[in-house]
Every structure is written in structure tokens, then in C-alpha cells.
Amino acid sequence: MKILLKKDIQKLGKTGDVVDVANGYARNYLLPKKFATTVTRGNIEQLKFQGIKNEEKQKEETKNLQVLADEISKVSCTITVKTNKEGKLFGSVTANHIAEALFEKGYQIDENMVILETPIKKCDLYNVTVMLHPEVKAQCRVWIVSESEKSADPQIEPSKSPSENNQETDEN
């Protein structure tokens, strides 16, 4: 049976393709799920018209995502983790951790969009790829910092300010 695909179907074809499939496959799966229609001139023209609309929407969406990618490329995230004395992480930093850090910065990024070639297991600066769309990628800088390093610096400053406050209260 020849049918016209309305959606991309893996190992079968793309939207707008006319393919020959078994009658049962067409009647029991493709047609009821609205993945395909019968081949007629009207259906072919309608699908071409919808394809033109979809291309325009995709171009606009790609432009918007490119702007977002430029913003993400300027962002630097810091993730604090527990490490041993040598700087090796207990566990690893995953795409989920990076997605959460970007979410805290105000970006709606799913963990599936974050591409890590290998798990992050050391404290350092990493350039991480964020795939917003198959055509749009962004590079985000991610600092992996040990909790002991981060907590060592801020403890000095807060300890000075309460002691100054205590001196002022003692003088009054």
C-alpha cells in the first residue's frame, strides 16, 4: 500500500515521502496514529503547504535559539563539589549538575541538551557544549571548585565582620 508520510518515521522515511508499506502496517499503525495518509493530489499539496509553514517557523526558532546560544556562551557557571586532598571528586559532575547550574542562572536547559564527552572528575575550568537545536550549539564555561577551597576564603571575611560588630557593642 502506498502512503504519504505526515511525520518523520525512523527507518521508513521523512515527512512528505511516498512510501510502500504492508497493508496491515498502514491500516493498524500509521493511519490511526495520523503518521500517514493515503496518497491523493490534495493531500500532497496540503502537506507541501504545511511544509512551507513549518520551514518558516523553524527558521524563526533557529534565529531565537541562536540569540540564546550567544547569551549562554557569555555565561560562566561555578559548581562546588566535595573533593579529596588531591582535587579528585567524590563521584563526578554530570550533565544534570550543569543543567541545574544554568537553570539557576535563568536558562531553561534540559540535561539532555548538555553534552559531556567524558564525566568531569577533577576541579578545573571546562568548556561544555549545550545543544539547543541540531543546528544551534553553545559553549558554556563551567568552573568545578572544591568545597574546601570555596569555604576557606569566605570564612575569613565573615569572621572579621562579627568581631568588628562585637567591638562596637563593647564600646557602647
Image (spheres, rainbow, N blue to C red):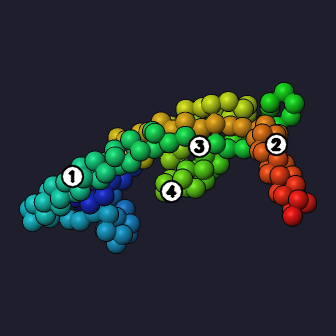
Counting residues from the N terminus, which is met first, the one under dot 3 or under dot 4? 3
Kindly identify the residue that appears in the image at 60 percent across and 50 percent down: 101
For the question of whether residue 91 can be seen, the reply is: no
Tell me if mark 4 has few (under 14), some (14-19) or many (20+) residues whose alpha carbon lies within 10 angstroms of its own: few
Element under disc 1: helix
Residue receiving disc 3: 77
In percent of width and height, residue 89 lies at 79, 36
Q: Which residue is mark 2?
A: 156
**Label 3 element class:** strand
Query: Residue at label 4?
Result: 106
Who comes first in sequence, dot 3 or dot 1?
Answer: 1
Pointer 1 local density, CA inside 10 Å: few below 14, some 14–19, many at least 20 = few
Query: Which class describes the residues within 10 Å of circle 2: few (<14), some (14-19), or many (20+)?
Result: few
Examine the rendered structure and indicate whether residue 24 appears above or below residue 109: below
Is 9 positioned to the left or the right of 95 in the image?
A: left
**Disc 3 to disc 4, how far (Cα)?**
12 Å
Mark 1 or mark 2: name the one nearer the start of the chain.
1
CA distance for labels 1 and 4: 29 Å
Residue 159 in the image: above or below residue 83: below
Tag 1: residue type? Answer: Glu
